[in-house]
C-alpha cells in the first residue's frame, strides 16, 4: 500500500473513531436536523424550497437525500458519510501540505483539521461547511496543479460545486480567481480566455441545480431561495463585524505572521505565487466571516483547512528537539484532545450496559412518548427538537418553520411562498388556524426570541390560554391543546 493510501486510510479511521460515539444522538445541531428533513422531502418527490424551505443551496439537501434514499432513516449512515467527507478533506489538506512543505507537515495538518472540525461545540453533526470544504479544498489543490485550460475548468467546476453547499464562499472564490487571472502576466486575450473558462466552470454545477426548477416551470423558486434570500440575509452592524474581528484575532495573528515571515515559514519552497494563492483565499475567507458578523464554531470549519498548514509549519519551526524526541508528546496531545468523544463513548457505553437504547436525545424520546399516547393523526409543532418530525413521519405546520429559527428571520419572508407578512402573523396563523394538537419546546418561551418581544409575549399568552403541560423532563416540554 502506498504512503498516500495509508494516510487516506488513517484519516478516515481517525475521523470515524472521533465521531463514532455521536452517531447515536438524535440531533447535534439544528442545521443538521433541518438538512435531514429537507433531504427526506426530496426523497418523497419534492424539490427543495417547494414543500419545505431552508436558507442553504440545494446540494446540501442532495447529500442527505442520497443517503436516505439508499439507507433509509439512519443516523449512523448520515454521520458515517459525514466522517468520510472529513477524512477525504483531511487527505487533500495533506496533499497541499506535502506539496507546500513535506509529508510530515501535510499529515499533521490533515490530522489537526479532523480534530478542529469534529470537536468543540456542535461540530460532531454533518454541517454544510463540512460538505463544502471537501470540494473547496479539492478545487484549491487542483488549481495549484493547473497547467492546462482543462484543469482550470475542472478546478472552477469544483469551486462552483462548493458554492452550492455554501454560497458565501463566493467571496474567497471570486477574490482567488481575480488574483489568478491578473497576477500571471498573461496578455489580455489569455486573461479573457481563462476568465471565460473559469466562469463557465464555476457556473456549471449551479446551472445543473437550476435545471429541475426550470423544467418544472418554477425557476423563481430556485432564484428566490438560492440567490435573493442569501443576498438579503440579516445585515450585521459594525459592532457585530468588530466582534467577529476580535473572535478571529488568534487566526488573524497567525495569518499576518505567515505573510510577514514567509521565509521563516518555509512553505512552497519560495514559490511566491502559490503561497500568495493560499494567502488570497484565506484573506477572502476572513472577509467572508467578518462580513457575516458571526463566528459560530461551525463557521470556522471553512477557515481551518487554510490555517492548519501555517500553524503546523510554525510549530515545526519553533521546536528545538528532533521529531523523534517530540513524537511521544505529539501523540499524547492528540490522544488527550478528543475529551468530548471519550465522554460520549461513556454515555453510550453506560446506556448499553444498563440495557437502554444507545440512541438518545429528546428528538427520539419525545416522538416515542407521542406515539405511545396519541393517534397517528395528531398534529405537532416542534419549536425545538424538530428532528422529531422525521421520527414521526410528519411535516412542519408551515414551510417557514422547517428550521425553527426561520420563524423569526424577517429577511427570509419575502422569498418564501405561502407565508404571512412576518413572524408574528405567521405564528398567529400556526396557532390560530393550523391549531397544532401538541407543541414541543425546550422552554416555556420561543427559542431565539427575546422574552419581551411581541412574538414571544403572544406565544406565552396563547400557550397559557389554550394549552396544558402534559410532559416535562429537564429541557423538554410537551403541551396539549385543551380542547384536543
Image: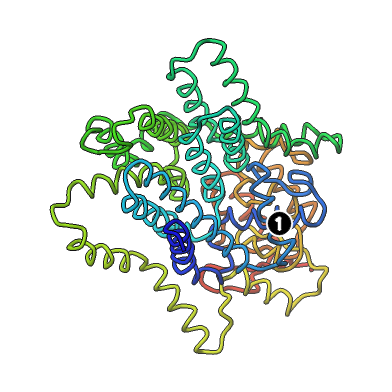
Q: Is residue 322 above or below residue 237?
A: below
The residue lying furthest to the front in this view is 1
Q: Quadrant of residue 72?
A: bottom right
Reply above or below: 473 against 444: below
Residue at image x 82%, y 35%?
218
In the figure, is residue 86 to the left or right of 251?
right
Residue 425 position in % (x across, y down) = 71, 42
- Is residue 393 visible in the rendered image? The answer is yes
Q: Quadrant of residue 243?
A: top left
Quadrant for the C terminus in the image: bottom right
Instruction: Find residue 443 and report its horizontal and vertical position in percent.
Output: 55, 62
Residue 374: quadrant of the picture: bottom right
Helix, strand or loop at disc 1? helix
Q: Is residue 240 visible?
A: no
Mark 1 crowd level (few <14, some 14–19, many ≥20, 10 Å Cα)? some
Residue placed at 73% from the left, 37% from the top? 208
Of residues 31 and 118, the one nearer the viewer is 118
| Extreme-left residue of the structure | 320
* Residue for point 82% across, 34% down: 214
- Whole-percent x and y of residue 267? 30, 38
The residue closer to the viewer here, 404 or 169, is: 169
Residue under label 1, please give it. 66
| Foreground of the two, 393 or 331 | 331
Residue farthest toward the bottom in the current orientation of the protein: 354
Along the horizontal axis of the image, is 36 left or right of 2?
right
Residue at (48% x, 26% y) in the render: 175
Residue 185 to residue 107: above or below: above
Check the image and report above or below for 238 versus 43.
Answer: above
Give the mark count.
1
Amino acid at each position: 500500500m502506498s504512503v498516500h493510501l495509508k494516510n487516506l486510510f488513517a484519516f478516515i479511521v481517525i475521523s470515524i473513531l472521533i465521531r463514532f460515539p455521536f452517531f447515536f444522538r438524535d440531533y447535534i445541531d439544528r442545521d443538521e436536523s433541518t438538512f435531514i428533513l429537507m433531504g427526506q422531502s426530496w426523497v418523497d418527490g419534492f424539490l427543495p424550497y417547494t414543500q419545505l424551505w431552508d436558507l442553504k443551496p440545494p446540494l446540501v439537501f442532495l447529500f442527505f437525500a442520497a443517503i436516505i434514499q439508499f439507507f433509509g432513516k439512519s443516523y449512523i449512515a448520515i454521520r458515517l458519510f459525514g466522517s468520510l467527507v472529513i477524512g477525504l478533506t483531511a487527505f487533500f489538506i495533506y496533499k497541499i501540505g506535502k506539496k507546500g512543505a513535506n509529508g510530515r507537515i501535510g499529515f499533521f495538518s490533515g490530522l489537526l483539521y479532523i480534530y478542529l472540525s469534529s470537536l468543540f461545540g456542535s461540530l460532531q453533526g454533518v454541517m454544510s461547511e463540512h460538505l463544502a470544504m471537501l470540494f473547496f479544498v479539492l478545487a484549491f489543490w487542483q488549481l495549484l496543479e493547473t497547467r492546462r485550460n482543462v484543469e482550470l475548468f475542472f478546478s472552477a467546476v469544483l469551486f462552483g460545486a462548493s458554492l452550492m453547499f455554501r454560497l458565501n464562499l463566493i467571496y474567497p472564490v471570486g477574490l482567488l480567481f481575480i488574483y489568478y487571472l491578473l497576477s500571471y502576466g498573461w496578455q489580455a486575450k489569455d486573461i479573457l480566455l481563462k476568465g471565460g473558462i473559469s466562469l463557465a466552470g464555476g457556473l456549471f454545477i449551479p446551472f445543473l441545480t437550476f435545471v429541475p426548477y426550470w423544467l418544472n416551470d418554477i425557476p423563481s423558486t430556485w432564484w428566490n431561495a438560492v440567490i435573493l434570500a442569501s443576498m438579503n440575509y440579516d445585515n450585521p452592524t459594525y459592532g457585530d463585524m468588530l466582534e467577529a474581528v476580535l473572535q478571529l484575532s488568534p487566526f488573524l495573528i497567525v495569518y499576518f505572521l505567515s505573510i510577514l515571515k514567509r521565509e521563516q515559514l518555509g512553505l512552497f519552497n519560495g514559490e511566491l505565487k502559490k503561497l500568495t494563492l493560499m494567502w488570497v483565499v484565506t484573506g477572502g475567507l476572513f472577509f467572508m466571516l467578518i462580513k457575516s458578523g458571526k463566528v459560530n464554531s461551525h463557521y470556522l470549519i471553512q477557515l481551518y483547512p487554510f490555517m492548519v498548514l501555517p500553524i503546523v509549519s510554525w510549530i515545526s519551526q519553533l521546536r528545538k528537539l528532533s521529531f523523534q524526541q517530540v513524537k511521544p508528546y505529539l501523540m499524547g496531545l492528540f490522544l488527550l484532545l478528543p475529551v468530548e468523544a471519550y465522554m460520549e463513548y461513556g454515555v453510550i457505553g453506560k446506556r448499553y450496559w444498563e440495557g437502554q437504547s444507545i440512541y438518545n436525545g429528546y428528538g427520539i424520546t419525545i416522538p416515542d412518548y407521542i406515539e405511545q399516547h396519541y393517534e397517528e393523526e395528531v398534529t405537532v409543532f416542534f419549536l425545538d427538537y424538530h428532528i422529531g418530525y422525521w421520527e414521526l413521519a410528519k411535516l412542519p405546520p408551515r414551510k417557514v418553520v422547517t428550521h425553527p429559527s426561520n420563524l423569526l428571520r424577517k429577511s427570509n419572508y419575502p422569498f418564501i411562498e405561502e407565508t404571512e407578512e412576518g413572524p408574528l402573523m405567521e405564528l398567529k396563523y400556526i396557532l390560530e388556524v393550523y391549531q397544532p394538537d401538541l407543541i414541543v419546546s425546550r422552554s416555556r418561551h420561543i427559542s431565539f426570541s427575546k422574552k419581551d418581544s411581541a412574538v414571544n409575549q403572544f406565544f406565552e399568552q396563547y400557550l397559557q390560554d389554550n394549552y396544558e403541560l402534559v410532559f416535562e423532563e429537564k429541557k423538554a416540554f410537551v403541551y396539549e391543546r385543551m380542547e384536543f
